[in-house]
Amino acid sequence: MHEQQAPEVFDTIEDVRRFLDAEGYVITKSSISRHKLAGKIQPSADGVYTLAAALKYAKAFLKEKTTGLRKSEGAALQQRQLLDARAELIREQALLAKRKREVEEGKYVLRSAVSQDMAARAVAFKTGLKQLVANNVLDWIHLVAGDPRRAAELQRNVLELIERQLSKYAHAESIVLQFEDESEAPDDAEISFEEEAGNPVA
């Protein structure tokens, strides 16, 4: 609305209309004439229109240019929007509190924790197989004594050891990678599996 020095009285209904139009109300000559005939705005006993009567009329019957609503409707709308915003905030806070509680109870796992665990298991799997080969290569050589006819026996032995390694990997509750120093490559890490309670590693 435009700020202006409001007169205390208006001599004509047109003066009232021009004032209310400048104040930001939607008001035409024809509409204010109809409203006068309907008794929505009337002059005082001395034939003039008071400022208080003009503002009361505008608040009750005219729409504001900025909102397209009557002032009383705009106030009610703002109040309703405020209540809706508060209710939405309360719902969001309750949802966040519920999600936090469920995370603490173990119902959800943080994405970052899953990614770190998967990366650790990938390194552990590769490192474990390398250790498996390094620890058993001499036994495999002696097992078949260089005899190709015993290849099937060698294959069974290798697969059996791999199966054991996979079992350890699958049932480990946590995986510990040990490095001699921080610059050591993951391929050279020492690996150990911590068994899950009630589910021993084969």
Image (cartoon, grey):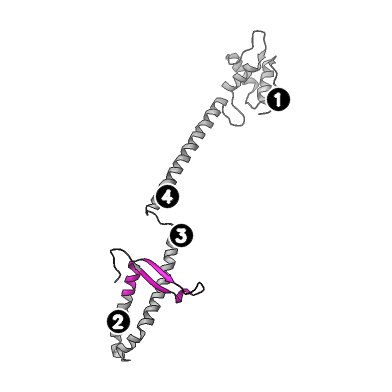
Q: Amino acid at mark 4?
A: Lys
Mark carried by residue 112: 3
Q: From this view, report whether residue 114 is shown above or below residue 40.
A: below
Name the image quarter holding the C terminus.
bottom left
User: Which mark is in front, 1 or 2?
Assistant: 2
Q: Nearer the viewer, residue 90 or 82?
A: 90
Q: Residue at x 49, y 37 (%)?
A: 86
Mark 1 or mark 2: whose residue is earlier in sequence? 1
Q: Residue furthest right?
A: 5
Mark 1 or mark 3: whose residue is earlier in sequence? 1
Name which quarter of the figure residue 39 lies in: top right
Are dots 2 and 4 in contact, CB under 8 Å?
A: no
The Cα atoms of the two marked residues, 3 and 4, are separated by 16 Å
Q: Amino acid at mark 1?
A: Gln
Name the image quarter holding the N terminus.
top right
Q: Residue at x 64, y 23 (%)?
A: 28
Helix, strand or loop status at disc 3: helix
Q: Position of residue 61 (x, y in %)?
A: 57, 21
User: Which mark is in front, 4 or 1?
Assistant: 4
User: Which mark is in front, 2 or 4?
Assistant: 4
Q: Position of residue 71 (x, y in %)?
A: 57, 26
The Cα atoms of the two marked residues, 1 and 2, are separated by 98 Å
Label 2: few (<14), some or many (≥20) within 10 Å? Answer: some
Left-right relation of 167 to 22: left
Residue under label 2: 157
Q: Residue furthest top?
A: 45
Residue under label 1: 4
Report the magenta residues as a range.
164-193
Mark 3 or mark 2: whose residue is earlier in sequence? 3
The Cα atoms of the two marked residues, 3 and 2, are separated by 38 Å
Residue under label 4: 100
